[in-house]
Amino acid sequence: MLSPFEVDATREKGYFAENTLAGSRMRTNIADLGAAITVVTKQQLEDTASLDVNDVFRYELGTEGSSTYTPSVLTSKGDGPADVIAGASFGTSPVASTNATANRVRGLGSPSFALNYYQAIAQIPFDSYNANSVEINRGANSMLFGMGSPAGIVNMSMAQAEIGKNKAQVQIRIDDRGSERASLSFNKTLIAGKLAIYGALLYNDQQFERKPSYDITRRQYGAITYKPFKSTKLTASIEGYSNDNNRPNNYTPIDGVSVWRNAGSPYYDDARRLIVRNKDGVREEIPVAYSAYSSNAEEVISFVESKGYSVERLYSNTSYPSLMTGAQITNPLDGKKYSIFGGLPAAYTTYGSSLYIPSMSTYANSRLLQNIVDGNLSAMQVLTGYNPRTGWNGATALTDSFTTTYGEGTADKPYIYDTPYANIYSRLTTYGGTADGYVSNNNVNGMFAYTYPGVTDSSVYDWRHVNTLQMNYGRQRNTTYNLELEQEIIPGLLHFSAGWFRQDFDSKTSYTVAQQNSAYLYVDTDMYTTTGELNPNFGKAYLQDYDPDRYDHSITTDQYRAMLAFTPDFTKNKNWTKWLGRHQLLGLASYYDQEEQTLRRRLAYIGGDDLATIRYKNNTTTAGWAYQSAATTIRRYYLSSDGNGVVNQASGKIGSLDDDTYHAPIQTFNYQTGQYEIAEADMYWNVFNANSGRSARKLTSYSGAWTAYLWDDRVIATAGVRRDINRTRNDADLTTNPERFVDGIYQYWKRPWNNWSRLSGTTSTVGAVIRPFTGWEFIEKRAGDSLLWEFVRNLGFSYNKSDNFDAPTSTAVDFFGTVLPKPQGKSEDYGVQVSLFKDKLFARVTWFESTNENSVLGGATATAIQRLWNHMDTTAYRSWLSTIYMLADGADPAAQANDTTATQWWQPYVENGAYSDPAKVEAMQKWVGEHWVGGSTDYKYYTNLPGSLGGTGSTKAKGTEVAIQYNPLPNWTLKFNASKNTSVTSNVLKELKAWEAVRMQVWDAANARALFEELAAAGKSSSIYTIAQLTSPDGISLYNVTDRKMVLVNNGDYKSDFWASHDYRDTSGNATTVSTTNGYGWYTNQAYYDSAYTPFKLQGLATEGQEVADQRKYNFSFLTNYSFDRGFLKGWAVGGAQRYASKAIIGYYGKASGNNKDLSDNPLLDMIDVSRPIYDDPVWYTDLWVSYTCKIFNDKVRMKLQLNVADVFQDGELRPTAVNYDGTPYAYRIVDPRQFILTATFDF
């Protein structure tokens, strides 16, 4: 006799399962539950060749899996889609997004996952090799988990050892992609009636259309069942899981190749210092000069003048008044002056002039480039304007090779332009295909933030066959343990169950390309290498990563639970008490304990020979020195076999997840010896302090559930209440650099814990199924012969209402540091159901309403939050304050620092930089911290918040679901599902609006003069500039910059000094972000606010009341399988599935907010117009299968051969998933062609 905690899978009929534990954790007939529950049977898994939850979700109500659903997730920079199905990681998120969680239920989000009704780690995918059943609960269900995703819960019950059975199975599967899968399972009774064991092994090498790629999984599973006594059962199981993956791209990369071709395929000829391109069918040669001191400077001037421009020569060196220091022209489009020197100067890269060269850029000086071709590494250093370190004098960097200051040359340290190495110093390293800032933001096509589209031309990229993300790979390891005790205390009345469940999960991911920015195809446009030889990669297309990060992620969970079930049955009594019916009462107590750690690892140079150590490693003599934040690395992965810009091969893979250190020799130039040399550098995947850390969670839960069968089973009522007490905490960064870094290594294991945050909630479930006409004698007599009366007898009405909450696994806070409100969900379902044909058909229609409230947001809303704190308040306002302090402290932006000290005026203030002065860093951060965020003195206010920063919103799903299972014959089964679902968002960005209101008051009141006067009163007064000079609307001159000045005050056109400022130093990114020559139009802080932040805020706010992304309102699926049980076709079976999904919103047309205008003062489209949605096409899917079953080996072995063809009529295509404001698509999902799968199963 089964305990109330067990389900007998043998009662499954085709695609219909009669009983489930998913309603209340006790065995209940599905027809007796008002909740929206589907049980996926073993036959359905086998017929449809489904292996995991994404396969299952193809056919079920309200579910979307990765084969048909594309999650709308942006990259860290928000410049395009993140390829989460292939595998993606983000600088601010500890958890990599993978195929396992690329799914959605009722449009509300990814569901929670459970194993044997214990909460499971979502990153570990289910697999059917050891599945007893898969249950899908749509919407909230507090009787299963008071805490969990409001979208629903998917549980897989794993196979257990069965006493009294001896069986085994071998299954082999292959497909037309080259996949190979083999599994073995067996069940053996060792002691009759007492002891049995079960074991299973799996090897699954999943291959893909785009190659080379793989997803290899190995699993080992063992289970034991022991019944020492009749009423006592002990079960135990253990599963080992390992996965190594290099999944292919599901999006096409951004098409920089076509951009480059359309620009005339420009390239750089370093031997002649020319940019060469084909403009309007005519070859054009354009001279370039790094500076006014270059030997070909006059050649550049003559060329520019030949184009009809008047060149203004500049003479700014007061010591040498006849020395030309620069030259500039006036752009007729915007009336601004732009330099004609500087490699690819502003005059050449600014839209609107005949000198304009689109799609071409240069790498910054001293940038370290690693080129990967066929998995082989070669590295070089960008030499443009690079004056290398030659040693250290205490904390001061020495650059003794040469001087760049005219008139200061000596025999030991010559002026660079008087040396034979001037051309080496001023050579360029270029690349093509770049998105033009003026087109992107946009002064040309009427749109702001235009996103360049992905490749659609197969002559540019063979998107059917080539995996562009071969360089991205990861692995996972996990061990799952489960112990269970079941005790029958009073036979048939009182049962007890207790269990322990543990998972030890570790993952390592190296998803470095498309980590910060979308995957973008560039072209190598250098005709020659740095050494002057012909470039073997000239004209080849490549993807690149920038400051690549790897992630080590580990989770350990321990769960304990105890359940007591009381099942009184009064119906057999002879007196009035029989009307009390029968009941199931359950009491549960559980405890969940989790610890999680994330290590963000970034490539850092840790040593090598003397040349490499001096140039690329940080100064080891300063206290708290670190390996991180030294030389910056870009890795270029070439995807072409020929130099024509065509992507026709994969990049090869470099390194492995076991290699924390690798040798990366760098081709560079030694100015002291006058020779090209190899710097024998060593690199290390060093733990980076930002976004590394630990979190912990402890969840205590108590619940009670009741199911009552009343009035001769005409009324089945369910009710439950649950109390969850969730505590979370994160750790905090160490306070000072000497604490953080010891011998260059980040001491992450010493990070202190923050205090616990407590979040609790009481949730409940109530429901009922009423069959009012069942059991009445006059109906029962007629129901056996009349379909109408059978319909009446079995007609039922269902209702269910439940809620839950989904507290994050770590502490999440708003801008004020307050813990975010409790994410919670509510579901309400009304249904009508009936069974017909002697229970061969069961049908239910359900009207539902589900909510997901206070969920942490992604997409444009998450980008808006990030841009408020990072772009506006940190990059802009904190940097503005920092610049004011540096100027008051004596820094001089107009002077080149002496060659024996720091090379730039701002570098002593950069934390952990190569030229840092720890005393200056500490003093500046202290002052800025006191003036930045009111009520705090923390220079790192946002990174030191007591939790991860986020914002919330809500989603509401409303719709109708129809489910029919029908078994007209024992050998014929059918299943039909249909749904209408609309999910809309609400209550978006309330945290952002509250914080922006506070910060806006600070920004509007910012006054530079008052701050300079305060600093002067404290003894910080510049010896170079007066306060009047520092606060002059004319600005401060910048060294070797002729087309802009630093301005820190209001010129009368802005609300405050802060809004008017530009060209100050960004101390966050070590750059000048807001500049009058910025390619994105970020000319002032006001323009930065309007352009970089406001559109994302408006886009987020505009989603209020709108449908969720990629929502398909109507869906249906029909499955059937017919097995021939007689005649010459005996043993054969045929089946198929037809699926349909209606059109989906993939974006909206744009409209103008008025905040952004083109150069002619016309408003740009910069936000979505929610009244004008853009849809993709409806989609149909057809799946077919055929199988043959027979006995072999003297009838000892049952063999089944099955051929599945998935998506029969699909030839492969590109499907748009996102659009620009003009309606043109920019993101394309690759849809693979039909798939052929052959499976051989042997049972014995």
Image (cartoon, helix red, strand yellow):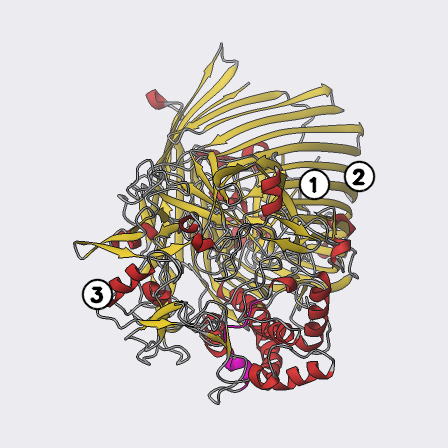
Instruction: Determine the secondary structure under disc 2.
Output: strand
Query: Image quadrant of residue 1181?
Result: top left
Q: Are marks 2 and 3 in contact (CB under 8 Å)?
A: no
Say above or below: 1152 vs 463.
below
> Residue placed farthest to the bottom in the image?
1052
Please say whether residue 568 is visible from this viewpoint. no
Say above or below: 247 vs 1030.
above
Query: Image quadrant of residue 763?
Result: bottom right
Disc 1 packing (10 Å; few <14; some 14–19; many ≥20): many
Q: Dot 3 corresponds to which residue?
A: 306
Return the residue nearer the eye: 991 or 777: 991
Q: Amino acid at mark 2?
A: Glu
Picture coordinates of residue 1228, whole percent (x, y): 36, 52
Q: Is residue 497 left or right of residue 98?
A: right
Disc 3 packing (10 Å; few <14; some 14–19; many ≥20): few
Q: Dot 2 corresponds to which residue?
A: 488
Rounded to the nearest whole Å, what is the CA distance between mark 2 and mark 1? 28 Å
Circle nearer the N terminus (2, 1):
2
In reply to whether residue 772 is colored magenta, the answer given is no
Circle nearer the N terminus (2, 3):
3
Q: Kindly identify which numbered label has been placed on residue 503.
A: 1
Q: Which residues are magenta?
A: 1056-1066
Rounded to the nearest whole Å, what is the CA distance between mark 3 and mark 1? 72 Å
Instruction: Determine the secondary structure under disc 1.
Output: strand
